[in-house]
Amino acid sequence: MFCRNCKNEVMEQAAVCVACGCPPRAANKFCFSCGSETSPHATLCVKCGCALAPTAAAAPAYAPARAGTPGAKSRMVYVLLGALVGLVGFPGVHNLFAGRTGRGLTQLLVSVLTCWLLWIPMYIWTLVEVCSVTTDAAGRPME
């Protein structure tokens, strides 16, 4: 493998070129496979045909939006629903948000059907869950 900055031959696992001090694949002057000179904007080496890794110079100046996990729930919304909506007498709404309908309905119905006599134990249960649960019903981590 060749350094793309100075064309010095380096080991495949090298993090830094010993001749120029740059990461071997960071620049865009030479092909890392055959060492031939390349155009700064080339994506393929015209001599050997290998794909040239994108460089920092070719990267956009802005950071692209993070895709995240599809369908992941927001941990902040989960905590706010548990702490605030549970505080006003409706614990369990946070579990409904996370997809745990059985647990959420249990907490909500026990509070409502006992005319809020058991609201405090349900709210304590809610606070414990808000502090400890980090995944939704499907097992996906909350963001």
Image (cartoon, rainbow, N blue to C red):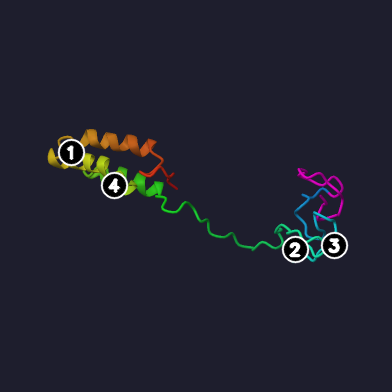
- The residue shown at (87%, 51%) is 8
Q: Secondary structure at mark 3?
A: loop
Which sits in the foreground, 87 or 31?
Answer: 31
Given the image, on which type of amino acid does mark 2 rest?
Leu
Give the Cα separation between the discs numbered 2 and 3.
Answer: 12 Å
Identify the magenta region.
1-20
**Residue bearing the label numbered 2:** 44
Residue 93 drawn at (x, y percent): 27, 46
Give the Cα separation between the discs numbered 4 and 2.
Answer: 51 Å
- The answer to which of marks 4 and 3 sits earlier in the sequence is 3
Given the image, on which type of amino acid does mark 3 rest?
Glu
Which sits in the foreground, 49 or 105?
Answer: 49
**Residue bearing the label numbered 3:** 37
- Where 52 falls versus 119 (above or below)? below
Pair 2/1: label in front = 2
Q: Secondary structure at mark 4?
A: helix
- The answer to which of marks 4 and 1 sits earlier in the sequence is 4
Residue 82 quadrant: top left
Residue 32 quadrant: bottom right
Label the magenta part by its dominant secondary structure: loop
Give the Cα separation between the discs numbered 1 and 3.
Answer: 74 Å
Q: Secondary structure at mark 1?
A: helix
**Residue bearing the label numbered 1:** 110
**Residue bearing the label numbered 4:** 96
